[in-house]
Each structure stands twice: as C-alpha cells, then as structure tokens.
Amino acid sequence: MATPAKMAILDRVSSLAPASVLPDISPAEAPFLSLRRGERWRRKAATEWGNHLEGAATDIGKRVACKRRLDLRQGRPALRRASLDTSPSIDGGEEGCQAIERYLCSLVPISFALTLLPTSAFAHASDRGHVLLLPTGYYLIGGAFAVAVSFLVLALLPPDALERFWRRRLPLFTVGDNAGTAVSLISFAGFAILLVAGFIGSRDPLSNPLPLVIWTLLWAGLTLLQGGFGDLWSWLNPWYGPWRLLSRLTGRSDGVARPLPQSLGCWPAVILFFAFAWFELIDPAPDDPARLAFAAGLYWLVTFVAMLVFGYRQWGRSGEFLGIFFSMVARFAPVERSDAGRIRLCWPGAKLLAAEPLPASGIAFLLLALSSVSFDGLSKTFFWLGLFGINPLEFPGRTAVIGSGSLGLVLTFLLLAGVFLLAVFLGQRLAQGDQPFAKAAGLLVWSIVPIALAYHVAHYLTALLVDGQYAIAALSDPFAQGWNLFGTADMQVEAGIVAGAGSAWWLWNVQAGAIISGHVLAVLVAHGFAGRLHPQPARAALSQFPLTVLMIAYTIFGLWLLATPTVG
C-alpha cells in the first residue's frame, strides 16, 4: 500500500512550499488531478507540475539575487530570512539565493515521485473537486460482496422473522398540528427575505444566503434530515401557511377546489423535477443569486396559484415536486407519526414496506431522483468528458456542455428506468408470479429510496460541510450591508475539514459506507416487498435475483463515481 507515502508527499508539498512560490491553480486545473492509471496521464502530470515549480524556482532565485545586489549597492543589509516557519533558515548573500533555489528545486523530484509510486485510484468526494488517494479496488469488491451476502442471508431467513423485525415500534410522545400554520408562515417570511437578498444582496454565491440556503441547507441538508427524522418539510414548506391564511379569509377549502384527472398522477411533478435537475446540473449559472431568485420566486408563485385552484393536498400530491420528493425520503426515516400524532421509533425503511404501489408517474419520479444525482457525479468525470472530446484539464465551462449535459441527463434516466423495469420483469418471470407487472414495479421501486438517499449523502457531504459554514456566515448579513445579526458574519470558514490525509480517510469511508449501506438496505426492503408479491419464500427469493444483480452493479458504479478523477 503506497497511499500513506503518497499522502505524506502531498502534505509535504502543501505545507512547506511558500504560497507566493506555488502557482495559483484551481482544482479543475491542478495537474495532479490528471494522475490516474496509464503512463500517459502520469507523464503529463509530472511535466506540468514540474514545469510550474521549475519556473517558480528560477523566477524567485533571480528576484532574490537582484534584490541582494541592489541592497549592497545602497548600503542596506542583505536579505536575512524568508517568511517561512517550516523551511530552513535562509541567510542573505549568495548562500541565501542558492538555498532558496535548492529548496524549490527539491520539490520537483517530489512531484515526479508522486507519479512513480503505485496508485490505486483518486477519489472524488463532491462536485467541489476534492481529491483523495484511496485503494478503491478493495472497496468495489467489498461493496459488491456485502450486497450479495445480504441477499443470500435474507433468502435463508424465515419470513416470519423478517415480519416481526419490521413491525417493531417504540412509542415516545405526542405532537399536535396546532403550530403547523405558524411554522409555515415563518418559513414563508424567511423565504421572502432570501428572495430579496437574491435580487439586491451580494453577487458572490458564497456571500449571498439565497444560493447557499437553497442548494446547501435545503437540497443537501434537509434531504438528510428528512431521511433521519421524518417529514419535516410538511411543517417547513412556505405554501401551507399562506394557503391556510388565504383560505380562511376567502372561505375557500379543498372541498371546492377543481379536481385533477386521476390519470394525471404526479406527471406534473416529474416534469417540474426534471426542470429543477436541469437547472441545477446543466444551466450555466444556477448559483447566480438574481437568476436563482427569479426561478425560485416563479416556482413558488406558480405552485401557490395551483394550490388555490386545485387544492393544497391535491396539487401537493400531483405537482409540488419538493413535497413529493421529501415525503418519499421521509418514509425511510426511523421516526414515524401516527394519525393521532404519536411519535414512534421504528427500523430505517420500515415505513416503506407499508407503502402502496406507485403508479407509472411515481415510478418515473423516484427513478429520476436517483438518475439525476447519479448523472451529477458522472457528468464531471474524465470518462464522460472524454466521450465528447473535452480535455478535462482545460474544462471550457458549463456553457460549452449544455447540449451533452441535457442529453446525458435524459439518457441516464432512460437507461436506469429500462434496466430497473427489465430486472422486475425478469424477476416476475423467474418466480412465475401471478401479480400484475405494474403492481410489482410500483412496489419494488420503493427500494430505490435508500439508494437515492445514500447517493445524496455521498455526493453532497463535502459541500454541506464547507458551504454550510458559508451559509451560517451569510445569514448574518443577507443584504451585504455590513450587518452581523447572529454574530456569525466574521466566522472563519474551516475548509480544511475536507482537506488532508486524515479527512480523506474518514470522508471516503463515510461516503463509501453510505453507498454500500444504502444498497444493502435496498435489498432488505425489496425482499420485504417480494414477500408480499410471492407468498412462497423460494419464489420470493428467486424473484429478487435480477434486482439484486442490478443493485450490485449500481454499488460498483457508485463507488467508481467516488473514485474516478473529476473536474471541479
């Protein structure tokens, strides 16, 4: 294992080299991003990084020699010491120039040594270009093995034992609905303030709270809270309070709302979710505060009008994609609330097994949720960019890949949907079941929820850890007026929490563990649904074989996404 040695070399380069000497290289342009299996990539990285350091060494040596000659002519003392605590003492005169040159040039062989050490893979932790050095081959094999073993164990367990396992509950306390309207009104007021900040606040996405709250706290953070604590969005959504207030003032209720066709299902939500995914992944500037404020404000207004026309609950089930997505994720949470308001603890995923079969639109929605986050990772890989002739070390920007990105987003969804439906079809044929294919697909698609949540954890973890700090700071000064409302405006953002060898180790293990655990739980949930579709245990296990093969393949794909080189 050469990983510790390579991490030590990287740490040595980053800790000893003066900031003024090393070139200013963005994560997308850093030459050691190009280190991957293949001699061509290693030679290219060594040449680029070596040229940067050699040029910097020559330049600084010339400047110091010139400064020394000027000081001596003007009678001033020669340069005494470089401002480096970690470097050797550098005195003035010719020895000082030579010491600096020797120090800088010594970094060049270090960069070449990186390419000579055997490498397993570089892992990508998020869309921020975080690079890790990890033995991913072992994780790929181990992850696939864990999913396969879980299938075999479940096939041998008695069905009654699994039923008792899923039915266990631990009652806690009772929560009423009285505060729901007030919480939603507060949420709406906060949303309105964020929209104003988007239009008149800072243009910097890391200083304006709107993009930080929507992309980091809402999309990344709240999704994880939904999967851990249940349906918080039903309280926090910014529509319920205003709708309830306006309904009371006008005397309208859901009973007088215009009905939607039953065949419509949640296809409006599927279309809106696709538009949301396109805006996040393909649009040239989804982080631009004003652009995002316009899109978010327009979506709120259209949704609110639709709720007034078709009813809050009816449109919430058919067209409000955030509510539908969050409610699906909340079914995985180990916390449930009964109709009487009683809070109880259960096993993660237990509520999924109580779900009814989803219609075709619901199946498409869940598969789109997984395929979109999968494509988000895939679209930044060297592999994907290479398919379109794009040099990943000279990434031209999102505008240049709008066409290929749009095509990839659609193809990823169609491919996942086709493979999933094929696996369900083959499973039904193997088990010779008499249940309709639509019912089997509508039930088994719920097993996608743990996988989608796991991909969400793996993909957005580093963004949440770093950008979450920026969000806390930005909320203290939403309009860039120099305020410090919560005392956090001047907080130091600790980006180092996702940098260095130690962070690389725990980040990779958390992300890889999430991917593997999500697929294992998906196998567990799918096996529970198979028992509902096929009462005979042997047929239930046989019906799950194709779907388990798909989940093993998707586990390997997910770990590969974490490990393959990517752009920023």
Image (cartoon, grey):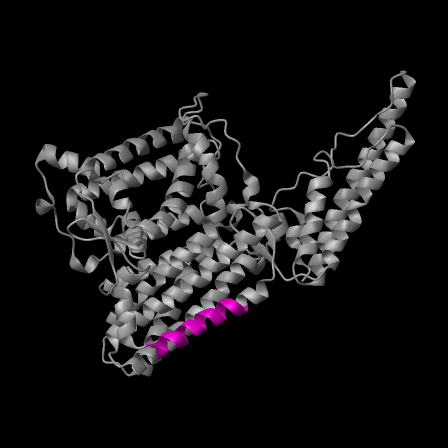
Q: Residue at x 21, y 34 (%)?
A: 182
Q: In the rendered view, does 87 fall on the left or right side of 235? A: right
269 is higher (above) or lower (below) than 196: below
Q: Nearer the viewer, residue 301 or 478?
A: 478
Residue 461 screen position, x and y as percent: 47, 49
Residue 359 screen position, x and y as percent: 24, 63
* Residue at the outermost top position: 75
Q: Residue at x 20, y 44 (%)?
A: 175
Q: Nearer the viewer, residue 388 or 377?
A: 377
Residue 271 screen position, x and y as percent: 31, 53
7 is higher (above) or lower (below) than 68: below
Q: Which residues are magenta?
A: 141-157
239 is higher (above) or lower (below) than 432: above
Q: Nearer the viewer, residue 226 or 311?
A: 226
Q: Is residue 294 magenta?
A: no
On the question of residue 567 being in view, the answer is no
Q: Is residue 156 magenta?
A: yes
Which quarter of the rendering shows the N terminus?
A: bottom right
Residue 353 screen position, x and y as percent: 26, 65
On the question of residue 280 being in view, the answer is yes
Q: Residue at x 78, y 47 (%)?
A: 108
Task: Give residue 177's quadrant in the image.
Answer: top left
Q: In the rendered view, does 239 fall on the left or right side of 275? A: left
Q: Nearer the viewer, residue 306 or 481?
A: 481
Task: Give residue 350's quadrant in the image.
Answer: bottom left
Task: Give residue 238's quadrant in the image.
Answer: top left
